[in-house]
Image: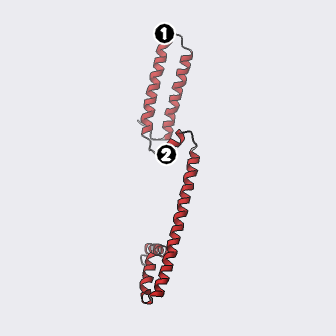
Amino acid sequence: MAPKSIDAVDDRIKDVIQDLFQIQVATHNYAGPQTQQELVRLITQLAESLAVLSKDASALPDQIPPEIIDYVDSGRNPDIYTREFVELVQKSNQYLKGRSEALTGFRDVLAEEMVKAWPEMKTDVDNVLEGSNIEHTREEKLAVQTNGTSS
């Protein structure tokens, strides 16, 4: 039965470490042919433990992005990767927020100038502004969900 948790895989890793320790002790105390069978048995046990570990570990869900694994493999701290990623996301969010605010300002100025140039289009411009107002649309959707009617 394959374990379904990280703790079970952790136990398998401990088993492998124990097998390696036993092999180290057996090689240190090697006394020729009489201890050779014990060493062969320990190496076989290690191979079996590694096979079980591999099978159990492959059943775990992949939750670590490959970029982080490459980052750690190259000897770098994953906390630094996380900090750099968060800073990049913040920078991108600030850029998009500024762009959104600029477009909202442009929309308002354009609507104002259109009403000045063509006063007869005021109702159409107001309808477009009302349809493009994200905050108003969210409030309407919330009102419909809670009350069942539009405000």
Q: Which amino acid does label 2 sit on?
A: Glu
Q: Report the coloring of the rendering.
A: secondary structure
Disc 1 from disc 2: Cα separation: 48 Å
Question: x and y percent of residue 72 in the render?
Answer: 54, 41
Q: Mark 2 points at which residue?
A: 67
Question: x and y percent of residue 19 in the render?
Answer: 51, 25
Residue furthest out toward the front: 117
Decide: is 53 above or below 84: above
Which quarter of the image is occupied by the C terminus?
bottom left
Question: x and y percent of residue 137 in the render?
Answer: 45, 74
Identify the secondary structure beneath mark 2: helix
**Foreground residue, 149 or 91?**
91
Left or right side of 69 for 59: left
Disc sitting over residue 44 in the figure = none
Q: Residue at x 52, y 25 (%)?
A: 20
Q: Name the residue under label 1.
A: 33
Q: How crowded is mark 1: few (under 14 residues within 10 Å), some or many (20 or more)?
A: few
Question: x and y percent of residue 21 in the render?
Answer: 55, 24
Q: Judge whether residue 151 can be spotted in this image.
A: no
Identify the secondary structure beneath mark 1: helix
Q: What residue type is labelled 1?
A: Pro
